[in-house]
Amino acid sequence: MTGDGTTSTVLLIGEFLKQSELYITEGLHPRAVTEGFEKGKKKALDVLVSLLSNISPKEIKFTVFLVRLRIYFFRGKLCF
């Protein structure tokens, strides 16, 4: 177990696709599904930004350091 989020990501994307298929088979245009994903992405990013506004610059620097360290150790599994 590496904890890099691969399994969680695959499960989440699989559920998105399953739900998308239901809507498309009911007649919803695939472009509408894509637009919904884009709106969801924007909302998620807005929430993350609002959460970051409550964190001190020192905590943000430390968090960025941890993320870079994690990327360094797991770069074999990441696609750049």
Image: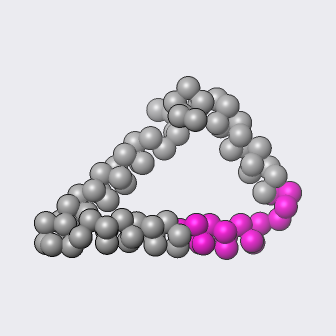
Does residue 27 appear left or right of residue 38 in this picture?
left
Total tally of numbered discs in the picture: 0
| Residue farthest right in this picture | 58
Tell me which residue sits at (80%, 57%) in the image.
59
Does residue 4 appear left or right of residue 60 in this picture?
left
Image spot of residue 69 (x, y percent): 71, 36
Rendered image quadrant of residue 17: bottom left
Vertical order, 27 against 18 (above or below): below
Query: Looking at the image, which is closer to me, 64 or 78?
Result: 78
Does the magenta portion include 70? no
| Residue farthest top in this picture | 76
Tell me which residue sits at (77%, 44%) in the image.
65
**Structure colour scheme:** one colour
Does residue 27 appear left or right of residue 80 in this picture?
left
Which stretch is magenta? 44-59
Query: Looking at the image, which is closer to me, 59 or 77?
Result: 77
Does the magenta portion include 50? yes
Image spot of residue 49 (x, y percent): 67, 69
Image spot of residue 80 (x, y percent): 58, 35
Tell me which residue sits at (75%, 49%) in the image.
64
Tell me which residue sits at (59%, 31%) in the image.
74
Q: What secondary structure characterizes most of the magenta part?
A: helix
Does residue 46 appear left or right of residue 1 in this picture?
right
